[in-house]
């Protein structure tokens, strides 16, 4: 059984026209990621024998519905996820299993889509480590 909540976040994730909206968009993205991470941490508490992500056989797979956030159970059912799912899994396991204060980070790229005739933005989610380095979990899993 799955639960598919929907959120309408009006005015966010624009294309950089308003600096205040950019700040709100960045904060909203982190809040959404942290929500999934919290769900994943609870899952790992209840299921402590969950395999470690990097040795589990899970692979990176682009999700055209890039606004869909998936938890550990959903990822293990399909053995694949895009960058946000992989990072939410990885950050939760680093925190819960190893006590490492990891966090989600993201990059944003705006580009013009000639096929669609409009500007689009893409996000890429990374795992931030306490020493200031980042791990591109998606690349480690086949991106």
Image (cartoon, rainbow, N blue to C red):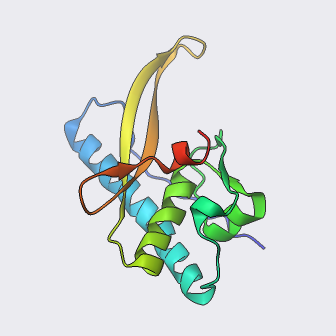
> Residue at 50% of width from left, 53% of height from top?
8
The quadrant in which the C terminus is found is: top right
Give the residue furthest to the left: 19
Name the one closer to the observer, 83 or 39.
83
x and y percentages locating residue 67 in the rendered image: 56, 48
x and y percentages locating residue 73 in the rendered image: 68, 70
Name the one closer to the observer, 126 or 13.
126
Vertically, is 123 above or below 101?
above
Give the residue furthest to the front: 55
Name the one closer to the observer, 67 or 61.
61
Residue 14 visible within the image: no
Query: How many numbered circles does the render carry?
Result: 0
x and y percentages locating residue 103 in the rendered image: 35, 62
The quadrant in which the N terminus is found is: bottom right
Residue 110 visible within the image: yes
> Residue at 44% of width from left, 47% of height from top?
125
Name the one closer to the observer, 23 or 140.
140
Image-based side of 139 in relation to 31, left or right:
right
Vertically, is 119 above or below 20?
above
> Residue at 35% of width from left, 72% of height from top?
100
> Residue at 58% of width from left, 44% of height from top?
66
Image-based side of 18 in relation to 113, left or right:
left
x and y percentages locating residue 12 in the rendered image: 37, 44
């Amino acid at each position: 059984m799955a639960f598919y909540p929907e959120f309408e976040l009006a005015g966010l994730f624009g294309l950089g026209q308003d600096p205040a909206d950019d700040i709100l968009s960045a904060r909203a993205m982190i809040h959404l990621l942290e929500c999934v991470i919290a769900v994943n941490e609870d899952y790992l508490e209840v299921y402590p024998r969950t395999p470690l992500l990097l040795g589990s056989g899970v692979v990176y797979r682009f999700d055209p519905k890039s606004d869909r956030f998936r938890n550990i159970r959903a990822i293990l059912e399909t053995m694949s996820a895009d960058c946000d799912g992989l990072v939410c899994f990885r950050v939760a396991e680093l925190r819960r299993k190893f006590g490492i204060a990891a966090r989600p980070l993201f990059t944003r790229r705006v580009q013009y889509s000639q096929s669609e005739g409009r500007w689009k933005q893409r996000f890429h989610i990374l795992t931030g480590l306490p020493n200031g380095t980042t791990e591109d979990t998606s690349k480690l899993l086949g991106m």
